[in-house]
Image (cartoon, helix red, strand yellow):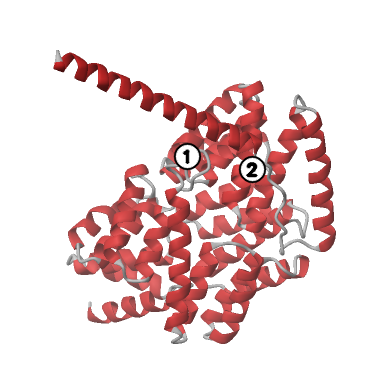
Amino acid sequence: MKKRYFYLFIGAFFVMAASFIIVKFKHAERSKAETFYPLLKAKGHSSEEWKTITARFETLMKTVKTNASDLPSRLALTALFIGEARTTGNHKYYDAAAMKFVDEILEREPSNFEALSFKAMIQLSQHHFAEGIETAIKARALNPHNSFIHAVLVDGYVELGDYAAAIESAEKMITIRPDARSYSRISYLREIHGDYPGAIGAMKLAVDAGPPGDEATEWTRVQLGQLYEHTGDWNNAEKCYDQSLQYRPTYAYALAGKARIATAREEHETAIWYCLQSDSLVNDYAIKAQLARLYDITGENTKARKVYAEVITAMSKEAEEVDGDENVGHYADLELAHLFLETKNNDKAVKHAVAEYNRRPRNIDVNETLAWAYFMDGNVQGAFALIETALRTNSQNPVLLCRAGLIYAKNGDVAKARTLLKKAISSNSNLPTSLRKQAEETFKLL
């Protein structure tokens, strides 16, 4: 009898618990639906550009508030929020805003092509790559002759390390519509397959295909500058950043590029000035980490530790929110692994790199990061087991070549180590100071 009452009690408890979870979920969904997302003041816009954006935002918001069935205005707001996410770096805020309107559209029209395409973009932005590809495939089935959705699939497949599928999508994309979006993705595919001249050529086409001064065009111009950096062509890299700043004087990513140029010239105070300017204009953790590295180089270690701590805390907090709302939570394990490597917390770097590896074990950047984390943590065999995968596309990224060379040297493969280290050191590229020193010292001993 007592056993029977016990089971009745357990059953009632689970029913109550389930009911509580359902009520809590419905409340959270209702709160999300009722949330209002005003525009956040962005320092990177010109005053005229900001007036245009705010006027458009106010018009669209007025429309959607008075007309629940106006889906085109909701799509336009989604596009506006996605654009602001990149311009300001406030991805957490604007991705949530964009997802709100995407969900509203898909609730009414589950097969809305534009909404599915935007949803896939947001998922990729938040590093939900498998989910993003799944959503993009649904959209592609509705409109297989749309260049944009193939571009989204290129991004997703690259991030998951399915490079053959990425190339297949890229071929369809460029055939349908050769434009700035297509050329920039072709450029990246060429880059990771070791073809820097081809990558530079395609990125030039991407720059020429866009209107000068447009944020997307200047973003592309900065990517071209970084390709020049990788090949050690600092003069052309600087020309890209200077041109970008002529068109957009407060463009954060061009200022960050100028900081890298100054760093390469060992003009560290100038580099810090550019980096501080860039950091004041956009919320980008990579730029903050760049600033921290500069403080380390100049011996301002207290400042460096402070910046690193702030970035790690902020990124960890955002990553934890994935559990609370996976629609807009950001998987940040790869970035955290990089930060912990820079701060010499190698055990934590391994932990986060493993977490990212478990999500996408075929991506070359993830394999490189985990291999390097193992190497720095003293696990040479673990590093060696992964570095071949990191090199499988024939990427000539100088940091990858340096790290691979050091791993092969430690594993006793002197010939391969010499080849890789010589190529990396002689490239005159943007190698981190400590990595270059480590590579040069090892090369002398081989």
Q: Position of residue 292 (x, y in %)?
A: 48, 75
Q: Is residue 96 above or below residue 445?
A: above
Taking the spot 71% from the left edge, 60% from the top edge, the residue there is 42
Quadrant where the image shows the C terminus = bottom left
Q: Which comes sooner in the sequence, label 2 or label 1?
A: 2
Instruction: Say what secondary structure mark 2 lies in.
Output: helix
In this figure, which residue is indicated by the disc labeled 2? 97
Instruction: Say what secondary structure mark 1 lies in.
Output: loop
* Callout 2 crowding tier (Cα within 10 Å): few <14, some 14–19, many ≥20: many
Taking the spot 20% from the left edge, 66% from the top edge, the residue there is 378
Q: Is residue 413 above or below residue 333?
A: below
Residue 16, picture quadrant: top left
Taking the spot 30% from the left edge, 51% from the top edge, the residue there is 354
Q: Amino acid at mark 2?
A: Ala
Q: Position of residue 129 (x, y in %)?
A: 46, 40
Q: Is residue 333 above or below residue 173?
A: below
In this figure, which residue is indicated by the disc labeled 1? 326
Q: Is residue 399 visible?
A: yes
